[in-house]
Image (cartoon, helix red, strand yellow):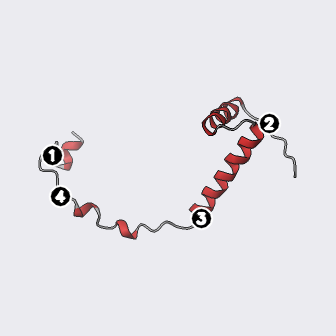
Amino acid sequence: MSQINVHLTSEFEQALAEFMQLRQIKTKSDAIRAALKEALERARRHREAPDFSRWVGLGLQEPENPAPRFRSDDDLWS
């Protein structure tokens, strides 16, 4: 297994400690491996463009609010 030396900022070390506590990970090296693995998996999933075509028109299917707080869009900004 290859070895990588990393210098951690205090902010990163604090975030890493929170991650370790959240995931119940005992060592920093295991926590960094887990965080890196999750980040790589997330990046791989997002490489594919999401398909939002099924969302088109969903808002129009819901009924309008019978008692709106504002009479018009202009009232939102006044």
Give neighbour class at mark 2: few <14, some 14-19, many 20+ (Cα, 10 Å): few
Give neighbour class at mark 4: few <14, some 14-19, many 20+ (Cα, 10 Å): few
Q: Secondary structure at mark 3?
A: helix
Q: Earlier in the sequence, mark 4 or mark 2?
A: 2
Give how far apart the Cα atoms at labels 2 and 1 are.
Answer: 55 Å
Residue 9, quarter of the rendered image: top right
- For badge 4, the amino acid type reads Pro
Q: Secondary structure at mark 1?
A: loop
- For badge 2, the amino acid type reads His
The numbered dot on residue 68 is 1
In percent of the image, x 35 and y 65: which residue is there? 55
Foreground mark, 1 or 4, reads 4
Give neighbour class at mark 1: few <14, some 14-19, many 20+ (Cα, 10 Å): few
Give how far apart the Cα atoms at labels 3 and 2 are.
Answer: 29 Å
Determine contact: label 3, label 2, CB under 8 Å.
no
Q: Earlier in the sequence, mark 3 or mark 1?
A: 3
Q: Quadrant of the C terminus?
A: top left
Residue 76, quarter of the rendered image: top left
- For badge 3, the amino acid type reads Arg
In percent of the image, x 27 and y 60: which residue is there? 59
Question: Mark 3 — residue?
Answer: 47
Determine contact: label 4, label 3, CB under 8 Å.
no
Determine contact: label 3, label 1, CB under 8 Å.
no
The numbered dot on residue 63 is 4
Give how far apart the Cα atoms at labels 4 and 3 are.
Answer: 36 Å
Q: Earlier in the sequence, mark 4 or mark 3?
A: 3
In percent of width and height, residue 11 lies at 66, 31
In percent of width and height, residue 45 lies at 58, 62
The numbered dot on residue 7 is 2
